[in-house]
Amino acid sequence: MRKLLCAGLMAALAPLGAETIVIRNATIMTVTKGTVKGSVVVKDGKIAEVGEKVLEPQGATIIDAAGQYVIPGIIDCHSHIAVDGGVNEGSVSVSSMVDIKDVINPEDISIYRALAGGVTTANILHGSANAIGGKTIVLKMRWGKDAQQMIFEGATPGIKFALGENPKRAGNPQGGGRGAGAQTVQARYPATRMGVEDTIREAFNEAKAYKAGWDAYDAKVAKGEHPIPPRKDLKLEALKEVLEGKRYVHAHCYRQDEILMLLRVADDYGFKIRTLQHVLEGYKVAKEIAAHGAGGSTFSDWFNYKMEAVDAIPYNAALMQKYGVVVSLNSDDAELMRHLNTEAGKAMKYGGVSESEALAMVTLNPAKQLGIDNRVGSVDVGKDADLVIYDKYPLSDYAKVQKVLIDGTVYFDRDKEVSERPAKEAQKKKLTDQEKQLQQQQRPQGGRGGRIG
Amino acid sequence: MRLLGIFAACAVLAGAASNDTFLIRDADVYPVTSAPVKGVSVLVRDGKIAEIGPKLVAPKGIKVVEAKGLRVYPGMIDSATQLGLSEVGAVRETVDTGELGELMPQLRALASVNPDSELFGVARVNGITSAMTYPSAGRGGGRGAGGAQLISGQAALIHTSGWTWEDMAVRPSAAVCVQFPNLGRGGRGSIPDDVLGMLGEAGPAGSYTQTLRTYQQQIAKLSDFFEEARRYQRVKAAHEPGFEPNLKYEAMLPVLERKTPLAVSVSSPKTIHDAIAFAEKQNVKIVILQPRDLRSAAAELKAKNVPVILGKTLALPGNEDDPYDEAFTLPEEVHKAGIKFAFGTFDNEFVRNLPYQAATAVAFGLPQEEALKAITINPAEIWGVSDQVGSIEKGKTADLVVTNGDPLEIQTQIKYLFVAGKEVSLENKQTRLYERYMKR
Amino acid sequence: MKKLVTALLLFGAFAWAESPQAVAIRNAKIVTVSGPPMAKGTVVLRDGLIEAVGENVPVPADAWVVEGEGMTVYPGLIDAMSTVGIPSLAPAPSTGAVSGRGGRGAPTTAAPTATTAAPTPRSMGPEDRPQTASWVLAADEIQPTDPRIATVRSAGFSTTVTFPERGIFGGQGSIVDLSGAEKTGEMVVVPAVGQYIALARGGFGGGMGGGFPGALMGYIAYVRQIYLDADHYKLVKEAYAKDPRGMARPQYDRALEGVLDSRRILLPANRVVEMDRMLRFAAELKQPVILYGMREGYRPEAAAVLKKYNSPVLVSLKWSEPPRDADPEQEESLRTLENIDLGPSTPGLLKKAGVPFALYADGLDQARDLQRAVKRAIDAGLSREDALRALTLAPAQIYNVADRMGSIEKGKIANLLVTKGELFDDNTRIQMIFVDGKQFKPADEAPAGGRGMTTDNPGVNQ
């Protein structure tokens, strides 16, 4: 009976069942109620108690966190991991008919690596190739579960917009294209920022007309009539949801002119931008952003890699917050997402953001931006037990993630994983040797690389 | 009265001329090459460290930096950047790395460095006072030579502040960059290439035998070039009439004389071994850049005393099955193997995060002192400038950073910065934008 | 004398592939699949059907007799997903890259066919119906002159389920008996068995150079939109049929007609993630589905998700091979290593889990390659009977034609395979094959898509 190693591996890393857990003797950074030196009780997937002294339920699993720190699970507001078959539907400039939810890859190792960096929830976005991109989804990093089980239940779905250089790149096939083969490409409108605005306005004009058609249909049905419904158009359906406030807009943007443009377009059509993503010049128009009510999700210290980023400053987060914008720090990168805790630390360095405010930028603030702060984002009784245990002060590069819980289940355990590495190495070696044997058998005598077709 | 005026003018002039003479008083000094000392002062005279000791008396009229409760460290050194050679990665016009041509040792990075690049201002205010800047095609910009270039030119070790590139030069030609041929293979998106191949979708192109053949041909090409350079060396030494200087071979002479090392980028055990073997055969010095996968190469690097420059500690593992902390533990692995190493960011915008790369290595096992050495004295030694920089010792150039804490901690603030013995403002484009928009 | 006559008649039988009125294969081992094998029995074929089969069946007087001593008779093999019969879909000469149709749709080497015009304008959205030919029936595209028919028949296949595998919606597949008749219509067993759908995967840029769709999610959105449009179209047509007065007439859309006509769909799925995704998608579209590919079918998660939906699947016989010429220092991922190691155990494991499945050749068209591939599955835990079933009765059941083919039973179509030796053993030779009662002798192994059509020319191989 052959051992199904993959299954074995998954099982080894699969979470223990939801149990009652006490995380004991830690320094708990709650985000909402300051820092508590004490314990957290987890029951039925939720935080049951937090305090200096807690009532430890009979039979609870004890995690001794003496000398260690607990923070809420980190929430990355901008990520492209776990997506199968391409992150951009770049063929058209309005691709709201596509949905990231359709192509979730729960077996992407990036999920596990993010988990090992303390991330428990991520906003998985379409790329930035289109002025209006595809629909987006919020996932919990429940490693080992299937695609459906990864979805953050009840989180409002989103849609990605993109402004600036990226969505107009396909309109300028000769200039600006990075490594796009030698083929002559048909230019795709728009080619300028002006065209980006036009594309968005045109799309919403269409969406308004589409909505009017459906509203008329709904009215007739309400009156007891049986009309033929209009044709359902996936592209316009998503925009209709935006107009009705049922779908959040996450807009990738850099320069202050395009940020302001989008806020005004949204005002004109009567919807809100939920978050401005990257928003590297957000500090220049922080007032307007705060007045509109959009959140800002930005990088801690990226700048200069393209023209629209030359005025990016690491004080962006601090400044936007000063003007009243809800600010989060995101990664947009599978590597950076593994140390959002230290990105939060940088907010303290640049602009004097306080410790709890900085931590909030990767926990409670992104939770608010995604509308899930009733469930996650802080160590508060009643919230999901999404918790990270660090061996040292979390807002420092000296710290390591020790354990991560999601819904009260341990999904990452560093000590356990490290102890299992030799066994995994051995399994792999065994299979590699077996394969080498198979290759030897297949190769003819003194073969030079076998049958190359 | 006039005389007083003249004296005053002289005093002012003297003061103005001596902005490279000053005293840092009462700080905790971390020399790196010796144990930290608390509550001492550092006297800098004419840009050089003159004295370190308790209760030093400042000569009249010189500037005093009150540093009680603060720390003094040597300025940090980033062993891999393209500072000054690249401004906006996505805009080719602003990028001067990656020239055309296969064998180009004569290209000098130094004289193409733009001292007014905004990136210097950003890097130095977090304590990075000098950096190696490389001419090779880097990430994001150099589309010039593509993958075919074998020798890219001469890297320079420069200060991150100065009026001109001449001003900034610490070692004008610190290494000759060699793009050793490679046998690479990558993945695509969330599914690695070999898995795609297994599923009958686009698999890895080409065969290993072909790749290996090309690889060996490229190494042979390099060998031949070195041979030609050696012949040139002999002809030149013989002082024959009608001798014509050849810029390419001239550039190779310091390499052949073992004065300047080759800086070679190789990442796997086989390529590391082949690079070392090549250097041995050619009897030249070598520094290995960004080795990722050591295995058997570790012992060889130690045995042959080859130093390495490690890339970003904060990097993803190479393969799907690799432990998630594979890159985090590499510095400790290198240190344990007894290999001399320094950190390089292989970046421009993130040079300022050099100390945090070192800190992450500490979290995963590297001893704290080693981390600090790897961004100060080690690179100074590796690049042959340890007589000038890399530690706080008498006689060295005053590249100093005064902080309110451990520079490897993110929240630590830099309070004063001294590059090449002169105080440098902690202002840069970003702080100016910050100040401006604070007032909107 | 009798022997001479028999020999002459046999020679005559080999001389040209024409169906005698009746043929009797006697004294052979008969593996019916529908029942226990017979050590010694007789099968009688007449007019393209099985007239009788059994241990003591009398040989009719007018029957041509095949002495089956030392031979075994099996039902003709059915390739559950193929392009044989449509010459323009033959794979391009191999360049060493991994080929195979499973899980990889999208126009690859297809030359322009009668159904698609030469350069098609770049698609700008689902309304352009990109890469869609859903109205096509393979039956209409079959050309009896496709050289692959003879090749594949020599490997033991009497029947293929041929699909017009082009683009996203390729059209409907047809069950085709490889009888090489002059009139294509004679070869067709069932003209329309289901809609072929393929979803390509895009890169990071997702189709910026080409048209819509570029990324996988674009393909899925497009398919979803087509079904929404089809439902709406049907609604409008029905309303218009009831009373057209005052109503704008529905615009004729043959793509939607093709989709509405299909009784089931075929979707690609190799990884467990894809199986989950495709089954959920088919359920959302309310379409009966057959998944094809199944490269990760050996994983327990695969069986679990397949059991949940209880849809039948087609397992590719092209097992993953270790790379021929790889960097010895480069480690392969555990996933790949497992796939190479455990791939052939997929059929056995699916059988154990009770998942209905069939095997398909996925381009393997040489008898030796086919036998070897099946043998590997047998060595990995699939019983011989189940292996045979997976290439005969199982595909017949999946396509609802088990009442007329897939086993040796009275009344069923006379598709038979006669071998010397047990099928799937290394040294077994195929002696002859009957398709719709017509007898063929396999040629010597010829390269795929060989030269000329009649590789079973009379007299050449005696």
Image (cartoon, grey):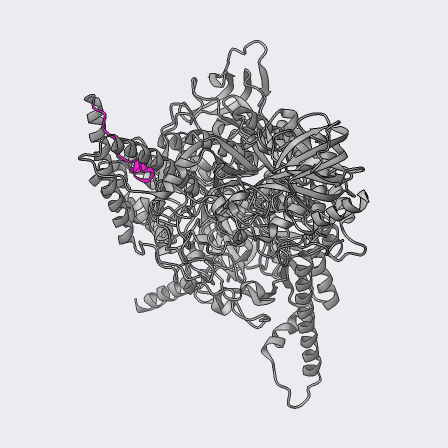
Task: Return the x and y of residue B257 as percentages of the image width and height.
Answer: 69, 71
Locate the N terminus of chain B by quadrant: bottom left
Is residue B72 at all visible to an observer of this figure?
A: no
Q: In the picture, residue C60 is in which quadrant?
A: top right
User: In the figure, is residue B368 to the left or right of C371?
Assistant: left
Task: Return the x and y of residue C13 as percentages of the image width and height.
Answer: 70, 47
Residue C285 highlighted magenta (yes or no): no
Locate the C terminus of chain B by quadrant: top left
User: Depth check: A168 or C15 in front?
Assistant: C15
Q: In the picture, residue C427 is in which quadrant?
A: top right
Is residue B104 at all visible to an observer of this figure?
A: yes
Magenta stretch, residue numbers: A225-239
Task: Return the x and y of residue C214 as percentages of the image width and height.
Answer: 43, 48
Q: Residue at point 71% right, 60% down? A: B274
User: In the figure, is residue A260 to the left or right of C41?
Assistant: left
Task: Return the x and y of residue A252 as percentages of the image width and height.
Answer: 36, 44
